[in-house]
Amino acid sequence: MFWSTRSRPTPTSTPSATGGEDDGQWYNSLKLYAEVVKTTKEVASADGIPFTWDDGSDSELKLAVDEACTAQQSASFFPAGCGTNFAVYVPSGVNYRFRPMNQTGAHIAAALGGNGGLPNPPSRSVWYYPARSINGQAAETRPQANDISAFYGKCQVANNERFIVLPVAPWIAVGGPSFGFRVTDDGASLCMAHSAPAPAP
């Protein structure tokens, strides 16, 4: 996106007129970015989670959006704008029911570059855009399996449908819940909202 300043290999092709690469080629990428920022702000405010965006975390999110959209488009140039009509899963330190899965969330974030880095090894960039695994079979823990199953159902992700995975390392670190949303021609809308945490005994 126009946000990214990180160098990349010289493009071997130019953007096409499909998959978001038109006069509004960054429009869907912007929807994705804006929904993540809006949702984390709203949840942090409602549930007293100590999280705020700063210049560093904002830049890291913008880079991650570019990485994810480029993976979605299987583009040989960087960055590429996102297409439309897709679901986004934002895994975190706890699942959408506030069940702990910090190691899982941190593992995904680290594999995809963590705090402003790049996927290591680079072949892991495909993790940004996986296909649905039936009944959450790719999950590492029960809370994550419950999370992914809820994401598939609430966000209407069909078998073998691809979706974007976008971990936000600072959100994981403070224990913010995971969430999911869909990006369409009409905008972005939350489809897997968090459940309020149980009151302290």
Image: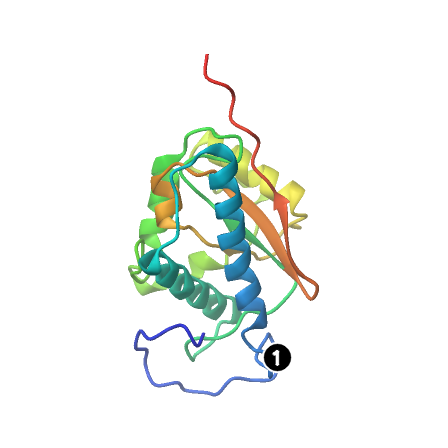
**Location of residue 177 in the rendering, given as x and y in whole percent from the top left corner:** 47, 38
**Location of residue 85 in the rendering, given as x and y in whole percent from the top left corner:** 66, 62
The one nearer the camera, 189 or 67, is: 189
Q: Residue furthest right?
A: 186
The image shows residue 63, relative to residue 110, as above or below, that is: below
Work out which quarter of the rendered image holds the N terminus and state it.
bottom left
For the point 46% across and 28% down, the residue is 99
**Location of residue 82 in the rendering, given as x and y in whole percent from the top left corner:** 55, 69
Q: Number of numbered discs present?
A: 1
The one nearer the camera, 53 or 72, is: 53
The one nearer the camera, 199 or 93, is: 199
**Location of residue 184 in the rendering, given as x and y in whole percent from the top left corner:** 67, 62
For the point 53% across and 37% down, the residue is 147
Can residue 124 be seen in the rendering of this structure? no
Within 10 angstroms of label 1, few (less than 14), some, or many (20 or more) residues?
few
In the picture of the structure, the residue carrying the numbered disc 1 is 18
The image shows residue 137, relative to residue 131, as above or below, that is: above
Identity of the amino acid at label 1? Thr
SS state under label 1: loop
Q: Is residue 158 left or right of residue 90?
A: right
Q: How is the image coloured?
A: rainbow
The image shows residue 90, relative to residue 46, as above or below, that is: below
For the point 41% across and 30% down, the residue is 100
The one nearer the camera, 31 or 103, is: 31
Can residue 148 be seen in the rendering of this structure? yes
The image shows residue 52, relative to residue 101, as above or below, that is: below
Q: Is residue 9 left or right of residue 153?
A: left
Quadrant for residue 64, please give it: bottom left
